[in-house]
Image: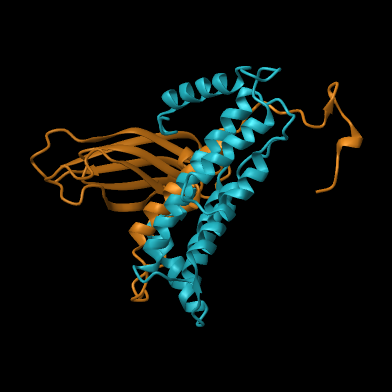
Chain colours: A orange, B cyan
Amino acid sequence: MCLALCDQLVVSFQLQEIVFKNFYTAFLTIRVQRRSPADVAGEGPRKWVTCLRNYCLMPNPHTEEGSQDYFSVFRDQMLCDVDEVMAIRMILRQPSPVWLHFTIEELQIYPRGQESPQKDFPSWLSHLTSREQPANLHGGLPNPEKVSAEVQQMWVLTEMIHANRAAARIGRFDVDGCYDVNLLSYT
Amino acid sequence: LAHHSHRTAFNNNISMAYECLGASGRRKKPGVNGRIYSELLRRICQDSEAPQEVTSPLLQRIQCRDHEAVPFDVFRYGVLTCFVLLEFVAKADTLYDVLDDGSGVADKRVCQAVLGTLEEALGASDFSVPIRYLEAGSKLGPDCLAVAMDRALLERKLSTSMKREEFLKKAAVLFIAKVKPVD
């Protein structure tokens, strides 16, 4: 079963990212209508081009997995150039008879230079599992789980004392609100 | 005395201790002076199992001079810091047991790798940016620590040991560096 959504734009733009929330769509195809760079007046024939073909949103169309997930599709993932886009057509497919209704929601389209907020995430958050899989570790290594547990507690204790710094001071070198130079010494 | 993690009870205990110590008694002037405060901190550290060479750098940082009047905020911070350091050293002691794997002696390269990773994680923290907490937590995860320890063993072939006292001292330095000196 297929459903097509079409968005006709007034001016052309450079597509950067498409973000949406899935609702039981199994596969997504995106086609764009582009204006030719030579067609300054915008009156020339426009061609529909497939930039994303059968992008899998649900690994198994009959089950829940991926059915309500958020997705981001970047220009780098597209099959073709997505500059000078005049219209976008999104073709949703759901072959399973289990789901009576399917669509995509919260659709957001970002042009180049305006990225989705998730871009601000630091790169290390995208690599939460170690890049260097410690497959060939020395046999004599201490248990990393136990080491990690103790070290993390030591870190927490240190951070806690850093956070609990005293606001008050002794005022050791203060004399009537000023420093007395004679009281200062080299240590 | 309540454990420092039971913050309300601990704060109540600290307040009562400050009042008791500050009561004039036989002294001419009421209030907690540097002599009483510093002596209390020394007693707290002496009564523990932590070695003196580990605790004395902290005392030097937070003690007061005998004649100085100690405000409650400074008193509380000093006492809290002592107890937290003692718990930190106890954790470091347990960590050494993990690193030596029951042999009684830990590999120096592994010790330095673990302490180096902890130092890096402490340096990464910034209270104005909460995400730094996640970054530090990621650095101290089992995977990263395993890679750090493995790399240390591969980079330096010569194997020497680090004694427990030296490990505790080096670990305590990382903690004490984050303690604000009394001024």
* Residue A80 seen from this side: no
**A71 with respect to B68 (left or right):** left
Q: Position of residue B174 (x, y in %)?
A: 57, 52
Q: Position of residue A115 (x, y in %)?
A: 50, 41
Q: Nearer the viewer, residue A65 or B37?
A: B37
Residue for point 27% across, 43% down: A91
- Kindly give the residue lying farthest to the front in the view shown: B26
* Residue B63 seen from this side: yes
Up/down of A108 relative to B89, above or below: above
Up/down of A3 relative to B9, above or below: below
Residue A106 placement: quadrant: top left
- Kindly give the residue lying farthest to the left in the view shown: A97
Q: Nearer the viewer, residue A110 or A132?
A: A132
Q: Position of residue B183 (x, y in %)?
A: 73, 34
Up/down of B109 relative to B84, above or below: below
- Kindly give the residue lying farthest to the right in the view shown: A182
- Kindly give the residue lying farthest to the bottom in the view shown: B157
Q: Position of residue B43 (x, y in %)?
A: 54, 40
Question: Which quarter of the image is occupied by the N terminus of chain A?
Answer: top left
**B176 with respect to A75 (left or right):** right
Residue for point 21% across, 41% down: A67
Q: Nearer the viewer, residue B53 or B137?
A: B53
Residue for point 39% across, 40% down: A19
Residue for point 73% across, 35% down: B65
